[in-house]
Amino acid sequence: MAIVLLTSVHTMAQKTLVTATKGKFLIGVAVNAQQVNGVNPIETELIVKEFSAIVAENCMKPQTIHPEENKYNWNDADKFVAFGEKNKQIVTGHCLIWHSQIGRWFFIDADGKDVTPEVLKERMRQHITAVVGRYKGRVKGWDVINEVFEDDGTYRDSKFYQILGKDYVKFAFQFAHEADPNAELYYNDYNVEKPAKCDAIVELVKGLRAEGYRIDAVGSQAHMHMNSPTFDETETSLKKIKAAGVKVLITEWDISILPSPYEGANISVNFKYSKEMDPYREGVPDSIQQKWNKRMLDMFGLFLKYNEVVDRVTIWGLTDNTTWLNNFPIRGRKDYPMLFDRNNQRKPVVDEMIKMSKI
Ligand code: XIL
């Protein structure tokens, strides 16, 4: 009994990242449908208490929300948006147009052949209009486009690109703006720290703005590893985006503690499991944990340094139990990238982040 009491008093007194970073940037978290539905009430409570912004980990993606032509699944997305409103959190929509997690129907006709450019453009219009229109005025901003470029700055050879060429990007921004003229619109990608990719994104943003399209921010997913990206690469990318005149959002931040065979975040990539690639099943050695803590603090310090342009820092998940990195890019590993551990306890690094934020 005494222990329970002490814990709850301690919890009450605990400061959060939200209060510590007030006036600097929003602190966000990606949430899954179970968390919105309160399946594990402890997780739901943490989301409400420790974060000022939420994004849906999966339920707004094309495959889930629009699985077939003219068929929409609004259930989880409706609950997600209502959850954010109830808890006075800023709600972000993720994501409208992406080559992954989208039904194959989007690109083919009744004979299974690629649709014409006109048909694909019309499907994009219908999809974006329906989704953005449904949550008009309730979602602050949308990841309009996810992952247009390869790491070398060339256009990804996606179905959108094959059928419509570069213009599909403009169409997406145009349709989103028409559906909710007050919503912020974002370009989102991983490995934004890679110089050639960053340059390509900056060129795209400048071009869109010069032609009068609304684009408010570049979302840098920031799925990081222990050795990449480097601190300097990350800082340079923030500087370049700042110079382009848009805001930066850190949209999917996590730092994997595990060895990685792959530096990107293309979710279709998958490597075979081996024990050597899963070294911390019984726990993380202290020296490695210290390295991870330092890296988290270095990167967080950088986001604080650029807080004039960094509007939001969102962590891609809540606890080490629920992180997608336990299954990417290798299935069935035990990773430790989140701010909360497998017992839903806040990690000591958060207290350090709070201290840094006040300076
Ligand atoms: C991931 C989710 O976290 C997983 O649950 C899902 O199985 C695959 O997608 N970049 C993105 C996110 O923009 O939408 C991805 O989310 C991670 C990589």
Image (cartoon, helix red, strand yellow):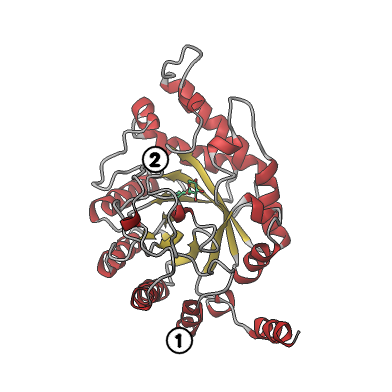
Any part of residue 125 in sight = yes
* Secondary structure found at label 2: loop
Any part of residue 22 in sight = no
Measured from the top left, where is residue 121 in percent x and y? 47, 27
Q: Nearer the viewer, residue 305 or 342?
A: 342
Q: Nearer the viewer, residue 206 or 319?
A: 319
In screen coordinates, is 113 left or right of 78?
Answer: left
- Residue in the picture at 66% in, 41% down: 134
Measured from the top left, where is residue 164 in percent x and y? 38, 28
Quarter of the figure with residue 7:
bottom right
User: On the rendered image, what quadrant is the C terminus found in?
Assistant: bottom left
Question: Of the residues shown, which amino acid type is indicated by label 2?
Answer: Ser
Q: CA distance from mark 1 to mark 2?
A: 41 Å
- Residue in the picture at 45% in, 21% down: 118
Q: Which badge, 1 or 2, comes first in the chain's sequence?
A: 2
Circle 2 Cα neighbour tier, 10 Å, few/some/many (<14 / 14–19 / ≥20): few
Circle 1 Cα neighbour tier, 10 Å, few/some/many (<14 / 14–19 / ≥20): few
Measured from the top left, where is residue 339 in percent x and y? 50, 69
Question: Of the residues shown, which amino acid type is indicated by label 1?
Answer: Ile
User: On the rendered image, what quadrant is the N terminus found in?
Assistant: bottom right
Q: Which residue is mark 2?
A: 268
Q: Which residue is mark 1?
A: 359
Pair 1/2: label in front: 2
In screen coordinates, is 202 left or right of 318?
Answer: left
Measured from the top left, where is residue 331 in percent x and y? 42, 48
- Residue in the picture at 34% in, 30% down: 165
**Does the residue tagged 2 have its C-beta within 8 Å of any atom of ligand 1?**
no
Assess whether mark 2 and mark 1 are in contact (beta carbons under 8 angstroms). Answer: no
